[in-house]
Image (cartoon, helix red, strand yellow):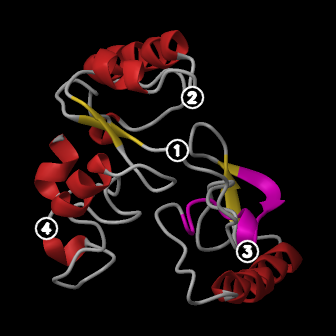
Amino acid sequence: PEQLQAFQPRFASTNYVVDTPTPENLLINDVHPYVTRDAIEKACKEEGPFSIVKGETIDELLSKLEGLTDAAAAKASIERYNELAHSGKDLDFGKPASRMFPIENGPFYAFQGGMNVNLATLMGLIGDEDCHVFDENDEIIPGLYIAGNTQGERFSVNYIPTMSGMSHSLCMYYGYVAGKNMARGI
């Protein structure tokens, strides 16, 4: 809910949070969001593969998902995440505190999803524009270079599916940069 106050609900961007949450920062710059609140509420009333389940509380939502998920494990996972969000430090996955929102205020929604075929690696090793790789302390690891899809966070928010092969340009360009820097010992 905290994120939805800052962003129109959309396909694949509801979880996209920036430091200045204004419409100019959205990836999709149109006036007609792909998924509206009305569409979500309508899907909650339908049955079938594209239906959405709604609950005012986590317990209510999980009870409606009986047989589809392990409710106890889901609740424990949510409680753990909330604990980390309140502490301001994600000890499990290293998510920045500024991106952590406790899951507390309903309504809550769920839908059955499946595997999505991505055209590129969405995360990977973190580095710089010279293709150096950083360690866990953000220090350059000497002699290690990255290029293309192994470079972290190139598509951490969204890969535009209508532009198949877009990641290949990064492979070609940064492969060249990495090779040049490796040869120079930079």
Image depth: mark 4 or mark 3 in front = 4
Is mark 2 in CB contact (under 8 Å) with mark 4?
no
Asked whether 146 falls inside the magenta stretch, the response is: yes
Residue highlighted by disc 3: 148
Q: Earlier in the sequence, mark 1 or mark 2?
A: 2
Along the line of sight, which residue is nearer the eye, 16 or 9? Answer: 9
Q: Earlier in the sequence, mark 3 or mark 1?
A: 1
Q: Earlier in the sequence, mark 2 or mark 3?
A: 2
Tag of residue 22:
4
Where disc 1 sits, the SS reads loop
Who's the residue at 29% across and 47% down the image? 44
From the top left corner, tell me how far across and down residue 83 is, in percent.
34, 14
The residue stretch that appears in magenta: 141-155
- Badge 4 amino acid: Thr
Tag of residue 68:
2
Residue 20 visible from this viewpoint:
no
Where disc 2 sits, the SS reads loop
From the top left corner, tell me how far across and down residue 154 is, in percent.
57, 68
Q: In the displayed structure, does residue 178 sit left or right of residue 10? A: right
Is mark 2 in CB contact (under 8 Å) with mark 3?
no
Q: Residues within 10 Å of mark 1 (few under 14, many from 20)?
A: few
Q: Quadrant of the C terminus?
A: bottom right
- Badge 3 amino acid: Gly
Q: Earlier in the sequence, mark 2 or mark 4?
A: 4
